[in-house]
Amino acid sequence: MMRAAVVMLLMIGAAVMLLRDAQAELSRPLGIAQGTLVQVPRGASLGALLQDWQRAGWISARQRAYLSLHARATGAALRLKAGEYEFGPQLGARDLVALVVSGRAVQHELRIIEGWRFEDAVAALRRHAAVQQTLPQADAAALMSAIGQAGVHPEGRFYPDTYRFTRGTTDVALLRHAFEAMAARLAEDWESREEGLPYLTPDQALVMASIVERETGAPAERREIAGVFIRRLRMGMRLQTDPTVIYGLGNAFDGNLRKRDLLADTPYNTYTRAGLPPTPICLPGRAALRAAMHPAPGETLYFVARGDGTHQFSETMTQHTAAVREFQLKRRRR
């Protein structure tokens, strides 16, 4: 009996020492370089991960054995989540597995800027190293079909925002997300729009928002700009806005808008055609959408750039002509 008790005590003591050693080895910071990115493939096994980590010199053979036992005992081995993870110097061996189980993968960002055209957003999407490119050569029509919107003109349909995603997210998934975001914002603002606006559909409001977006970068002016165009529509006046002309010229526009360009008739030339152009001319942001739905009241019908990013608004052609002369002369003097 005494011998059995001694053996039992020795075994318990050894187990305690082994447990303490395991705890120390699993908790000790590994000193992995800050910002080390590790890709965990879909379906990766615990054994494969531990082998890779040992080969990288992050864990020892003893830590690998302890970690394998720990992960299987806790069930962590069956809860690994694919993704890209960031390791750092303060993480211990146990922390590596816990991070992969947590699913807290690195988030990448794609920023779509207010006022961009659809082609600009697609270019940014295709440049992004973390996006999985499934349709790298597809044209606009094919991209719209891929997100379930075949036949829809893409301009203006994607919401400018900063989109966060994990590495390997597809181009189609991101485009669909941005499309759905714009549809939701447009529907929300349409429901809360002011009464009496000269829009028959939300799409017409989206067109107006895109014009407002391109006409001014000054937040305080957006509602005033929208008010001018709303009053023009109500009176049957042509909008006569340069950004629509430029959009209609497409690649023929060389950066210098000339009189002949204003006279060149296209579906987007609001100098030669009345009403709104057939589609948006850019991707409008939330502020431009709200301005189109809530234009500023007033009597102004004209505006001219002051040269400092803002505009001079006028109620009559006489006032407008004087403002044009004043601010054009200022620009020439500079």
Image (tube, grey):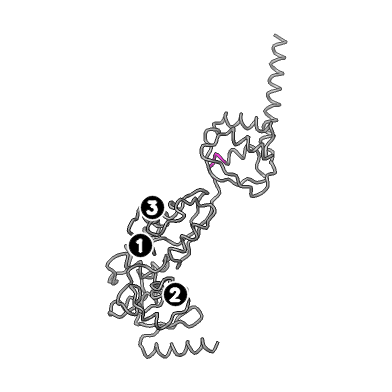
For the point 63% across and 45% down, the residue is 87
Q: Closest to the observer: 18 or 179?
A: 179
**Mark positioned earlier in the residue sequence (2 or 1):** 1
Q: Which residue is mark 2?
A: 253
Using the numbered discs, state the Cα–Cα distance from disc 1 to disc 3 in whole angstroms: 13 Å
**Residue position for label 1:** 153
**Label 1 sits on what residue type?**
His
Taking depth in this image into account, of 3 and 122 the one nearest to the observer is 122
Amino acid type, mark 3: Ala
Q: Are marks 1 and 3 in contact (CB under 8 Å)?
A: no
Write down the region rendered in magenta: 100-104
Which disc is residue 299 wearing? none
Image coords of residue 154 (percent x, y): 38, 61
The residue at the point 50 percent across, 52 percent down is 131
Q: Is residue 122 left or right of residue 3?
A: left
Badge 2 crowding class, 10 Å Cα cut-off, few under 14, some 14 to 19, many 20 or more, is some
Q: Nearer the viewer, mark 2 or mark 1?
A: 2
Examine the rendered structure and indicate whether residue 127 appears above or below residue 62.
below
Residue 267, picture quadrant? bottom left
Residue 103 within the magenta-colored segment of the rendering = yes
Which callout, 3 or 2, points at the residue further toward the start of the chain? 3
Q: CA distance from mark 2 to mark 1?
A: 21 Å
At which x and y percent is residue 280?
37, 67
Magenta stretch, main secondary structure class: helix
| Residue 330 within the magenta-colored segment of the rendering | no
Three-letter amino acid code at the position of disc 2: Phe
The percent coordinates of residue 213 (x first, y second) are 42, 71
Q: How many marks?
A: 3
Q: Secondary structure at mark 1?
A: loop
Q: CA distance from mark 3 to mark 2?
A: 30 Å
Which mark is in front, 3 or 2?
2
